[in-house]
């Protein structure tokens, strides 16, 4: 019975996804790598890393739109938990983002040329996962606070503000370290911390609910 209820909630949630904004964001992000790879020769690895980071930000801008749910006011009394359709939407979007990232990294490797330094794909994948996780955390908080199911238009500017703040971090806590920098490894330890924090924030925003207030006993009037 629980599986049937979950499927009855998750399948319509995935069908109702607004795929166009996330797909448009991924196309723009891929173009940042694909266009230079097609029009120019071998690129500098440091430039490719910068372009990959810009592509991550572009793709993550579409994450909030995955949570848009105009029908949410009518499904507030659903017997399934509120996080279930959210998880279905995030899972479907995660599959798209994983495929997009594989294609983008593959194209970035082709843009470097055969004689170039190999990209640190593991570290860059950590960065991409963290960027998406931060965008998802902000979008989940907006989803939690929005009664009308409008998420993307609010979450996208908030995510850009977070990216701008990350770019201004001082050197000892910087995240956007250039390729080959002496503190590259330390910076990716910080990326991992941010990833875990964003995942915890997402889980709490999606599942936590305050305890109902206990009613105080009312003394009879006139006694």
Image (cartoon, grey):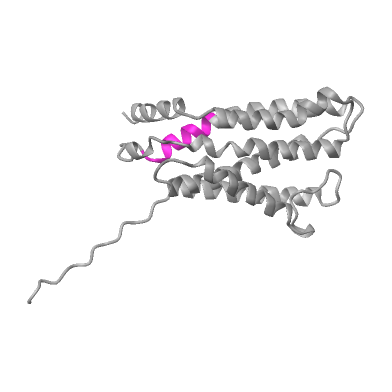
Magenta: main secondary structure = helix
- Can you tell which quarter of the image residue 131 is in? top right
90 magenta-colored: yes
Q: Is residue 161 left or right of residue 185?
A: left
Quarter of the picture holding the C terminus: bottom left
Q: Is residue 64 above or below residue 158?
A: above
- Can you tell which quarter of the image residue 136 is in? top right
Identify which residue is drawn at 50% across, 30% down: 18
Residue 9 place in picture, x, y as percent:
38, 30
Residue 209 place in picture, x, y as percent:
39, 51
Q: Furthest residue to the right?
A: 115
Identify which residue is drawn at 56% across, 46% down: 199
Q: Is residue 29 left or right of residue 13?
A: right
Identify which residue is drawn at 90% across, 30% down: 116
Q: Is residue 40 above or below residue 175?
A: above
Quarter of the picture holding the N terminus: top left
Residue 96 place in picture, x, y as percent:
59, 27
Residue 152 place in picture, x, y as percent:
53, 40
Between residues 141 and 157, which one lies in front from this camera angle? 157
67 magenta-colored: no
Identify which residue is drawn at 35% across, 40% down: 73
Between residues 176 and 33, which one lies in front from this camera angle? 33
Between residues 74 and 116, which one lies in front from this camera angle? 74
Between residues 85 and 118, which one lies in front from this camera angle? 85
Q: Is residue 57 left or right of residue 149?
A: right
- Can you tell which quarter of the image residue 36 is in? top right
| Range covered by the magenta-colored residues | 81-92
Q: Furthest residue to the top?
A: 38
Q: Furthest residue to the bottom?
A: 223
């Amino acid at each position: 019975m629980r599986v049937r209820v979950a499927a009855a909630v998750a399948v319509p949630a995935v069908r109702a996804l607004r795929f166009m904004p996330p797909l448009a964001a991924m196309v723009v992000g891929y173009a940042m790598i694909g266009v230079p790879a097609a029009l120019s020769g071998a690129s500098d690895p440091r430039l490719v890393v910068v372009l990959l980071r810009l592509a991550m930000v572009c793709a993550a801008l579409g994450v909030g739109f995955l949570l848009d749910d105009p029908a949410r006011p009518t499904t507030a009394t659903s017997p399934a938990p509120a996080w279930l359709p959210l998880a279905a939407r995030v899972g479907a979007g995660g599959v798209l983002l994983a495929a997009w990232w594989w294609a983008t990294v593959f194209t970035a490797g082709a843009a470097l040329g055969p004689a170039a330094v190999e990209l640190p794909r593991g570290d860059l994948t950590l960065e991409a996962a963290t960027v998406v996780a931060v965008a998802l955390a902000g979008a989940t908080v907006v989803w939690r606070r929005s009664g009308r199911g409008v998420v993307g238009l609010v979450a996208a500017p908030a995510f850009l503000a977070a990216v701008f703040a990350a770019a201004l971090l001082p050197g000892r806590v910087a995240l956007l370290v250039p390729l080959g920098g002496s503190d590259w490894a330390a910076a990716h330890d910080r990326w991992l911390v941010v990833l875990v924090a964003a995942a915890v924030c997402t889980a709490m925003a999606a599942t936590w609910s305050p305890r109902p207030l206990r009613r105080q006993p009312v003394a009879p009037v006139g006694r």
